[in-house]
Amino acid sequence: MPNFERVRPLVHNLQRYVRLSEDDKRAISQLHETPMHKTKAREDIAREGQNPSVVRLMVSGWACRYKDLPDGRRQIVGLFIPGDFCDLNVYILKRMDHSIGAITPVNYVGIPPSQLDNLIHAHPRVGQALLWHELVQDSITREWLLNLGQRSAFERIAHLFMEMFMRMRAIEHTEGRTCPFPLTQSDLAEATGLTPVHINRTLQEMRREGLIELSSKRLCILDWDRLKEIAMFNPDYLHLDHEGSYLDANA
Amino acid sequence: MPNFERVRPLVHNLQRYVRLSEDDKRAISQLHETPMHKTKAREDIAREGQNPSVVRLMVSGWACRYKDLPDGRRQIVGLFIPGDFCDLNVYILKRMDHSIGAITPVNYVGIPPSQLDNLIHAHPRVGQALLWHELVQDSITREWLLNLGQRSAFERIAHLFMEMFMRMRAIEHTEGRTCPFPLTQSDLAEATGLTPVHINRTLQEMRREGLIELSSKRLCILDWDRLKEIAMFNPDYLHLDHEGSYLDANA
DNA sequence: GATCTGTGATAACCTATGTGAAAGGCGCAA
DNA sequence: TTGCGCCTTTCACATAGGTTATCACAGATC
């Protein structure tokens, strides 16, 4: 199976939710045989208002969901890393209510809904895993709302760092205490509802306090425990724990 | 059918997405024959961390989804009105990652997942409508994120007013330019990430400018067009338009 | 190697929104 | 009818974070 490496993040992602059989995995890896799309960094992958015809599965790179206002203000409302589906909802909702943009160069496969239908029919547990994936994304969105509404700039940025580190770890993209972190300070600003200037100030402070290192697109979390306490980070909302899941209970 | 009146908001809700047959509607109204639950205003309906066993359908009153921080800060991350489902996701995710609280006295029916399963099997279009409903809720959550991240206090409150008015209108709970609006100023603060004091200041300003009236739990929108422009309100994210939907296209 | 362009660092200054406190009004319970 | 509690309204004051501007640097581009 030549594409197996490419499937790994997705399989990792889904296996947190259901135990997949070898047969399930084989079926998933066939998704990757649809043509691979490449976008350059900073390029739009989909625009609000469009009617996309495929479901996109991230293979490599980082992307974001964002919404913008007529006067140009932009808010990043979600981040995608390898193994994430961008718009599973295309199935049902015809019109995109947000845009998707590449942060880094991105590789993704675009899966026609019909193909996904077939997969789900033949492998219902994969279908459930996909639904779970979508629900986890929603849970993350709600946590971001709490983040923007109630946490201070410092707490907010700290929280985002922890979240992305954990998500990257779940797909085995971390090394020790470090992981890739390709967001610029402007991106961070758009994700947290702050100004680039204030992001910079706050990052300096976090460095001064020995909490993190961040340079050349890599994040290192120096003091996990203190950062966790500051951010009031409780990972439950990521639903990373395989244990206690509905699907598992009925396995 | 004695319960038909009670079903109306839900049927209105779902009919925006799919054309329901008389038979579908009959099936839906049977949901309302499960026992009715009543909660007092300000009471919790479900708490974060719990493992709820029913899917709740709002019959009357307003409720909210909220998340809180260990130090007591609270963020309302969504509002529920009659016809809304509170936790369709219980199907899959076992543990609540947020709480649900009543704003006013609330009546709801708690539907066992098995019963919903049966309904969906027998009436697949109802199942699709439910999924759509869930996706619309998510779209609303993303718009709230844009709201908190990028809009000023004034714009933010204006936007919330417009949204709730339109949602109330969709279930025929408006009269002319007015509708019930049971949130206190503290609730408004928790929904917008602002302080009660600042909510008050801003409301005074909106009244002074002749944009709205708000008293005794009723909202009147005096100048729809100006409010819409100020809030940069674009109703697309509510997906209220029946036209152009995937389901419709395949009807 | 010269030049661009995007990113990061900092500074001085400004303002929208938060804080804490007090007083008044209104609806509900007894 | 009175009283009690929750809301709302207001005030004076404090501050987190926004704004505008400048400079330095590194990696692309020619």
Image: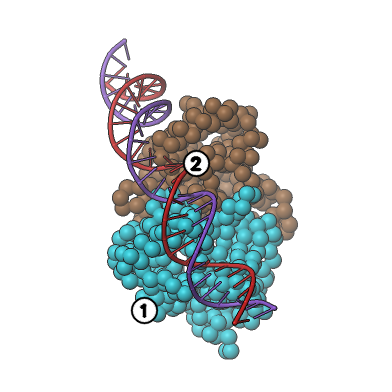
Chain colours: A cyan, B brown, C red, D purple
- Gap between marks 2 and 1, in whole Å? 42 Å
Residue hosting label 1 = A176
Q: Residue at x 42, y 77 (%)?
A: A174
Residue B60 is left or right of residue B235, and the answer is left
Q: Chain of mark 1?
A: A
Q: Is residue A53 above or below residue A23?
A: above
Residue closer to the observer: A193 or B161: A193
Residue closer to the observer: B10 or A165: A165
Asked where in the image residue C24 lies, by quadrant, the reply is: top left
Residue B171 in view in this figure: no
SS under mark 1:
loop
Which mark is drawn over residue B236? Answer: none
Q: Residue at x 60, y 39 (%)?
A: B230
x, y percent for residue A19: 45, 76
Amino acid type, label 1: Gly
Q: Residue at x 34, y 52 (%)?
A: B69
x, y percent for residue A14: 49, 73
Q: Residue at x 62, y 44 (%)?
A: B233
Q: Chain of mark 2?
A: B
Which mark is drawn over residue B153? Answer: 2
x, y percent for residue B60: 49, 38
Asked where in the image residue A33 lies, by quadrant, the reply is: bottom right
Residue closer to the observer: A205 or B28: A205
Residue farthest toward the bottom in the current orientation of the protein: A2
